[in-house]
Image (cartoon, rainbow, N blue to C red):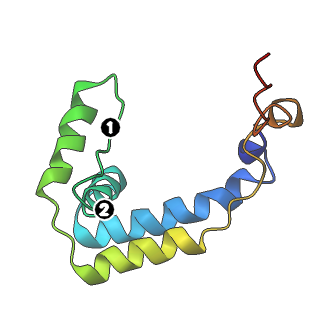
Amino acid sequence: MPRFSPENFPKNLKLVGQITELAKKKGVVASQLTLSWLMAQGDDIFPIPGTTKVNRLKENLGSLDVNLSKDEEQQIRKACEEADVSGERYVPQLMAQCYADTPALK
């Protein structure tokens, strides 16, 4: 996966670092901050985090207790909007299959 290649992965971790720093300032972990931010986007947003560990489930539920100020919401949004994602999502063979037109029905 090109985004996880040795040359791209460190670049793509920049946003993770920014979110982690904001979370530390808030006294929470990055996943809690991210889930809290998603829930703050409106009543029509339903984050569905996946986990196989009970401790991660409890950690994720902790996001319900995180209250973000408007300034914090804006900081997270700004970091996301300014993030420069390096590398294609898929290898070229898979990218060629993306965004293809559906053949006409006969």
| Label 1: few (<14), some (14–19) or many (≥20) C-alpha neighbours in 10 Å | few
The image shows residue 19, relative to residue 60, as above or below, that is below
Q: Residue at x 28, y 45 (%)?
A: 46
Q: Quadrant of the N terminus?
A: top right
The image shows residue 87, relative to residue 79, as above or below, that is above
Extreme residue toward the bottom, this view: 71
SS at mark 1? loop
Quarter location, residue 48: top left
Disc 1 marks which amino acid?
Answer: Ile
Q: Looking at the picture, how far across and down is residue 79, in whole percent?
A: 50, 73
Q: Is residue 84 left or right of residue 37?
A: right
Residue that numbered label 2 is attached to:
37
SS at mark 2? helix
Q: Looking at the picture, how far across and down is residue 68, in whole percent?
A: 21, 71
| Label 2: few (<14), some (14–19) or many (≥20) C-alpha neighbours in 10 Å | many
Mark 1–mark 2 distance (CA, rounded to whole Å): 13 Å
Q: Quadrant of the C terminus?
A: top right
Disc 2 marks which amino acid?
Answer: Trp
Q: Residue at x 36, y 56 (%)?
A: 30
Quarter location, residue 67: bottom left
Residue that numbered label 1 is attached to:
48
Q: Looking at the picture, how far across and down is residue 59, in whole percent?
A: 22, 42
Q: Is residue 6 left or right of residue 50?
A: right
Q: Residue at x 17, y 42 (%)?
A: 61
- Of 37 and 21, the residue lying toward us: 37
- Of 17 and 67, the residue lying toward us: 67
Quarter location, residue 29: bottom left
